[in-house]
Amino acid sequence: MIAIEADNLSKVYRIYANPTDRLKEWLTRRRYYQEFWAVRDVSFQVKTGTTLGLIGDNGAGKSTLLALVAGVLRPSSGQITTGGRVATLLELGTGFNPEFTGRENAIMSGTILGIPAKEMETRFSEVAAFAEIGDFMNQPVKIYSSGMYVRL
């Protein structure tokens, strides 16, 4: 018996250079985003009573794939079928505003911890270097993998 079956499962996110680009796109019907494929054309089966492990680098799509399996995210294409109940075990990023960028959330978190915003701005390059998430630091954290959340 099959417990989980994924057939050409994909999840793509739209990455905007500026938040106002979403509005410009809506008004002009022109494309202002780049596509980021978190998961692309993944197919697999997991039989009842077996275990599946996912291993990969930060940003490889492990958490996105698990969220697709759990039904937390809807796939951009493909299909996921589960035979039974599936639940997530871990939710990271509590306290982060999903609409804020990594930069904004880092500064806000520092402020909550009692570090003045100006000091956080001067320390931000150290935070960014530690997080190792590159250009995603300026994107909303709602598109981050759980590994990216942990690093931030």
Image: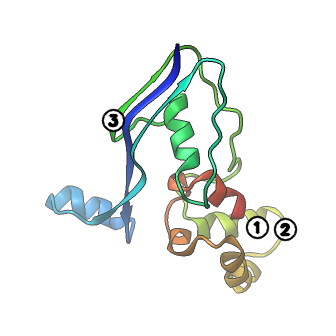
- Mark before the other along the chain sequence, 1 or 3: 3
Say which residue appears at 78% left-offset and 75% top-offset.
116
Contact? badges 3 and 2 (CB < 8 Å) = no
Contact? badges 2 and 1 (CB < 8 Å) = yes
Residue 28's x, y, as percent? 15, 62
* Residue with the mark numbered 3: 78
* Residue with the mark numbered 1: 111
Residue 38's x, y, as percent? 45, 53
Up/down of 86 relative to 152, above or below:
above
* Residue with the mark numbered 2: 114
Residue 54's x, y, as percent? 62, 45
What is the basis of the colouring in this image?
rainbow
In which quadrant is the C terminus drawn?
Answer: bottom right
Label 3 residue SS:
strand
Q: Nearer the viewer, mark 3 or mark 2?
A: 3
Q: CA distance from mark 2 to mark 1?
A: 5 Å
